[in-house]
Image (spheres, grey):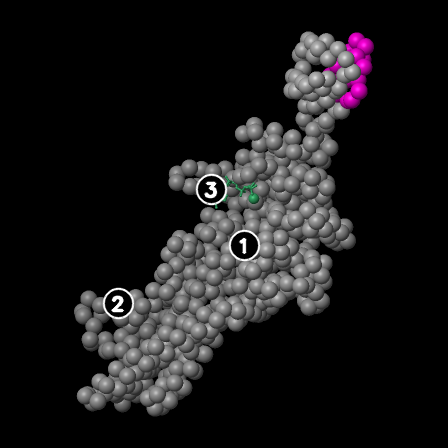
Amino acid sequence: MKLNRIWAMLLKFWYITINRPDRIFDIIYWPVIDLFVWGFASVFIQQVSDVSFLSMFLGGIVLWIFVWRSSQDIAVYVLEDFWGRNLYHQFSSPITLTEHMFSVMLFAFFRSICTFVVLTILAFIMYRFFIFSIAPFIFIAASIAILSLFGWAMGLFVTSLVLRFGQRIQVLAWSSVWIVQPFSCVFYPLSALPTWAVPVAKVLPTTYVFEGLRAIINGNLVNISSLLYSLVLTLIFLVLTSFLIRIAFKHAKSSGLLARGD
Amino acid sequence: MNPIVVKSLKKYFKEKGKTIKAVDNVSFSVKKGEIFGLLGPNGAGKSTTINILTGLLSRDSGSIQILGYEPEENWDYVKNKVNVSTAYYPVTEVLTVKQNLKVYGHLYNVKNLKARINELLSQFELNKISNRKVIKCSTGERTRISLCKGLINNPEVLFLDESTSGLDPDIAEKTRTLIKEYQEKNNTTILFTSHYMYEVEELCKRIAFMSDGKILTIGTSDELKKLIKDQTIEIKVIKNHKDLKKLLKDEGVDILFTEKNTIIFQVTKGSNKTYEILNKIFKAGFKLSHLHINKPTLDDIFIKIARKK
Ligand SMILES: Nc1ncnc2c1ncn2[C@@H]1O[C@H](COP(=O)(O)OP(=O)(O)OP(=O)(O)O)[C@@H](O)[C@H]1O
Ligand SMILES: [Mg+2]
């Protein structure tokens, strides 16, 4: 990996972001809507129950950002090159696939952090909710790492499909993360899932993070081994999807998709 | 060592069960400092060949060498010294002209990038629009932006795939001059495709004619023109126009056009036959007021090859 090329890509994504207002707007739009809807809903439920709904829901929303942003941004910034028929110049330059994907991941992480900061501040102003006061810093940091890595894996997966099948499946770029969310037990415990869904949930690293968050809110200690297990699962996903994107890239080179870009 | 060497290159595409032989056993090499033209009708396989050389497309078989390396061995070295420009694919459209050049400059690790960008912008007369988004630029402007991108790293090997299409005659002429100057100054090796024959004739030392994925012939434009034996001859006689027509008919030439005293006919067996016929005309005592022999152009060759399909 060469730093000048990573820098070039970050510069490119930065320019795309500042040149297109929608790219700044979408850093906050949906997350803030979520914060409003779920925040007020949980304030209401909190009044009629003694479970700490507010912390669980808002914690879920704020942390889910990392899966969402990472996976969606990766796919969207790659699709951007498709829409602009720009793969031609991009990949005739010295940049490698690894460098390209790594830069997208970094940039997606940067955008996640922006959203995270905005939401953390808003949640405090609106609901006096501060994520770092409900769980130890180390747990939050580990969760952010795991969720971002998993988001990257999802992003790689979608990008592979786009490279393999072309733009016609681009809707996946926006929707895939919402297929995973219900199984990740972001807002409810694993025990609330129907039995057929439990095995799926158990394969997803995200489940362990949100289960862990709820356990801590309920007064338990950080479960290190379950976090480690989740990390291992994430890494397995990353390795598999990295492998997948290599195959898809090879296919794109052979089918002519890179040269034509449609 | 030649900077571009292509040997028995093959690339087939499969589409709905059909095999398209886009590049079918193509071999050629381009010498250092040469501008080499790939000519051929639409779908001949020119772009496919260039895409394989720039690493955008994988090949089925055959070998390629750029700057002495099989690119797969050392893409990093090769790609930093090579570049490509085409009028067909824009650089990133949501970025401004300058932003694009900055991004590509970093991608190719260009030293003194700022100075290089300013130099290119003024050479290609893009200063005025340097802060405009590419999506808002006209076709000709985009073409020049793509050329700037292609030259940003001072490439040793440059691929130009119809990189001048869409330019107005004035700018096209200036652009050709720029390419030529740049090439002479840096002794750049250029592989060039274009549908403008005069451009190819003006720029390229050697030309390869491609059709249906195969190279039919390689040579200088003069050598290629000799391949076509057809000559069109236009004469005007002062009188006895009908007798002349009869003489030509007896010689078995194709009469293409007659009107008043003007006759246009075609000789298909080369210049010797032409002189033989003209000799007979003079000996028979016809007085000519006009004589014009049209030599074949690259266009004629192009059309002939394209129609043979
Ligand atoms: N990705 C692809 N999938 C299927 N067929 C392809 C693909 N790319 C090119 N072809 C086919 O391969 C042949 C050669 O195409 P190519 O683009 O190399 O032609 P060309 O000589 O550049 O033509 P033009 O002068 O029109 O640019 C054409 O028949 C084309 O339809
Ligand atoms: Mg072409």
Which-is-in-front pick, marks 2 and 3? 3
Secondary structure, mark 2, is: helix
Which-is-in-front pick, marks 2 and 1? 1
The residue indicated by pointer 2 is: A200
Distance from the alpha carbon under mark 2 to that under mark 3: 40 Å
Q: Are marks 2 and 1 in contact (CB under 8 Å)?
A: no
Distance from the alpha carbon under mark 3 to that under mark 1: 18 Å
- The prevailing secondary structure element of the residues shown in magenta is helix
Q: Chain of mark 1?
A: A
Where residue B65 appears, as percent x and y from the top left, is 62, 47
Label 2 sits on what residue type? Val
Mark 1 Cα shell of 10 Å, populated few (<14), some (14-19), many (≥20): many
A188 left or right of B90 in image? left
Residue B11 visible to the viewer: yes
A34 left or right of B83 in image? left
Where residue A169 appears, as percent x and y from the top left, is 37, 56
Where residue A78 appears, as percent x and y from the top left, is 47, 62
Magenta segment boundaries in residue numbering: B271-291
Q: Is the CB of mark 3 within 8 Å of ligand 1?
A: yes
Mark 3 Cα shell of 10 Å, populated few (<14), some (14-19), many (≥20): some
Residue B150 visible to the viewer: no
The C terminus of chain B lies in quadrant: top right
Answer yes or no: are tags 2 and 3 on the same subunit: no
Taking the spot 76% from the left edge, 24% from the top edge, the residue there is B292
Q: Which mark is residue B13?
A: 3
The residue indicated by pointer 1 is: A88
Q: Chain of mark 2?
A: A
How many marks can you see? 3
Taking the spot 26% from the left edge, 86% from the top edge, the residue there is A43
